[in-house]
Image (cartoon, helix red, strand yellow):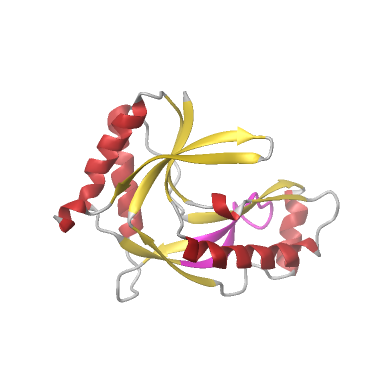
Amino acid sequence: MIRTFLAVELPASLKQPLVQVQADVRNRVSRELSPAMRIQWVRPDSIHLTVKFLGDIPEDHVGALQSVVGDALRTVPPFPIDVARLGVFPDLRAPRVLWVGLASRSSEGIPTTTLSHLVATVEHCVEELGYPPESRPFNPHLTLARIKEEAKEVGRALARIGLLDGDVRLGHLEVRTVALMQSELKPSGSVYTKLWEVPLGTTQQA
């Protein structure tokens, strides 16, 4: 069994702005933290957009997943996502995750449901292999940090500095492929390995 998830990887052109935002946030937050508060910052090269967390899967499902996901995404054209705003899960009263938000849009900048459609398409096709749909609504984000200790105090600190009040815009992500990633937990944190990648919209390109 291997631990896996489906994701959209980020290009280098987007990772650099994320590095800068993460460093700025980390600097601002560190001034407010007490020794008891512990925040684990995600390595920039590990930041990605999770489409579907699969968990532990049999290794012989790797090829089958590539086939069903690849076929399903042939009819979903590539699309852009705006990368903007900071937020937390579940809320500032006891935050556990600090993130940068995502919102799909049309070429005219009008919000669309394209990203939700992509996720629903993936959910539906992997059900064929016995993977149940998510019970929680999809909330697209890029995780910057995880709060490990004293979440309530961290939430108060974030509120004091008004971290979520500012307007953060990092550009946009062109969603052109979806990858199956293997996650291995190491003492230094999770290590991700790409097992395969399939393109979107090959029917339109044909």
Percent from the top left, x then y, of residue 61? 35, 27
The residue stretch that appears in magenta: 83-101
Please name the residue shown 17% across and 57% down the image.
Answer: 205
Would residue 204 be found to the left or right of residue 13 on screen?
Answer: left
Location of residue 113 (image quadrant): bottom left
- Name the one closer to the observer, 171 or 38: 171
Would residue 158 be found to the left or right of residue 72 on screen?
Answer: right
User: Magenta region, mostly helix, strand or loop?
Assistant: strand
Quadrant occupied by the C terminus? bottom left
Please name the residue shown 86% across and 51% down the image.
Answer: 35
- Magenta segment: does it hold 85? yes
Please name the residue shown 30% across and 76% down the image.
Answer: 108
Residue reaching furthest left? Answer: 206
Please name the residue shown 32% across and 43% down the image.
Answer: 122
- Name the one closer to the observer, 3 or 148: 3
Percent from the top left, x then y, of residue 186? 64, 34
Residue reaching furthest right? Answer: 35
73 above or below 183? below
- Magenta segment: does it hold 91? yes
30 above or below 138? below
Location of residue 179 (image quadrant): top left
Percent from the top left, x then y, of residue 135? 43, 39
Question: How many numbered markers are drawn?
Answer: 0
180 above or below 38? above
